[in-house]
Amino acid sequence: MIQTRAMSLTNIVAQNLLAARKQLNISQQAVAKKARVSVSYISMLERGARTPTLETLEVLAKAFGVAPLDLLRTGPSRRAPSGR
């Protein structure tokens, strides 16, 4: 039997943050400024090297114009950022 390993929430959030930023065509610096965190922290989040607190997840979601839950979702249920 082949077992598939589920992706960690940290990696899901990392992929979603990177995808949202690329879709909005904004820099890590712009996200960092909106979310009031450092550019290096945004970089670490996007690489999955750090896991955001719930407060930070909420601030990042607001910066991208999505619901915080959208940053935790995988697959087609994930919504695109609204461009706010």
Image (cartoon, rainbow, N blue to C red):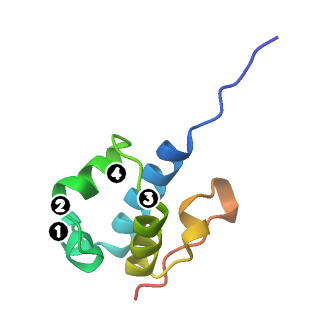
Residue picked out by circle 3: 53
Q: Quadrant of residue 34?
A: bottom left
Q: Is residue 55 above or below residue 53?
A: below
- Mark 4 and mark 3 in contact (Cβ < 8 Å)? no
Please name the amino acid that badge 2 sits on: Val
- Mark 2 and mark 1 in contact (Cβ < 8 Å)? yes
Q: Which of the two marks, 3 or 2, is nearer to us in this view?
A: 3
Please name the amino acid that badge 3 sits on: Thr
The disc, 1 or 4, on the residue closer to the chain's N-terminal end is 1
Q: Which of the two marks, 3 or 4, is nearer to us in this view?
A: 3
Residue picked out by circle 2: 39
The disc, 4 or 2, on the residue closer to the chain's N-terminal end is 2
Q: Quadrant of the N terminus?
A: top right
Left or right of residue 81: residue 46 = left
- Mark 2 and mark 4 in contact (Cβ < 8 Å)? no
Marks 1 and 4 sit apart, C-alpha to C-alpha, by: 13 Å
Marks 4 and 2 sit apart, C-alpha to C-alpha, by: 10 Å
Q: Residue at x 61, y 67 (%)?
A: 69
Please name the amino acid that badge 1 sits on: Gln
Left or right of residue 67: residue 23 = left
The disc, 3 or 4, on the residue closer to the chain's N-terminal end is 4
Residue picked out by circle 1: 29
* Front-most of residues 33 and 27: 33
Which numbered circle lies on residue 42? none
Please, which residue is most extreme toward the top here? 1
Q: Is residue 62 above or below residue 47?
A: below
Residue picked out by circle 4: 45
Residue 39 in the image: x percent, y percent? Answer: 17, 61
- Mark 2 and mark 3 in contact (Cβ < 8 Å)? no
Q: Residue at x 44, y 58 (%)?
A: 53
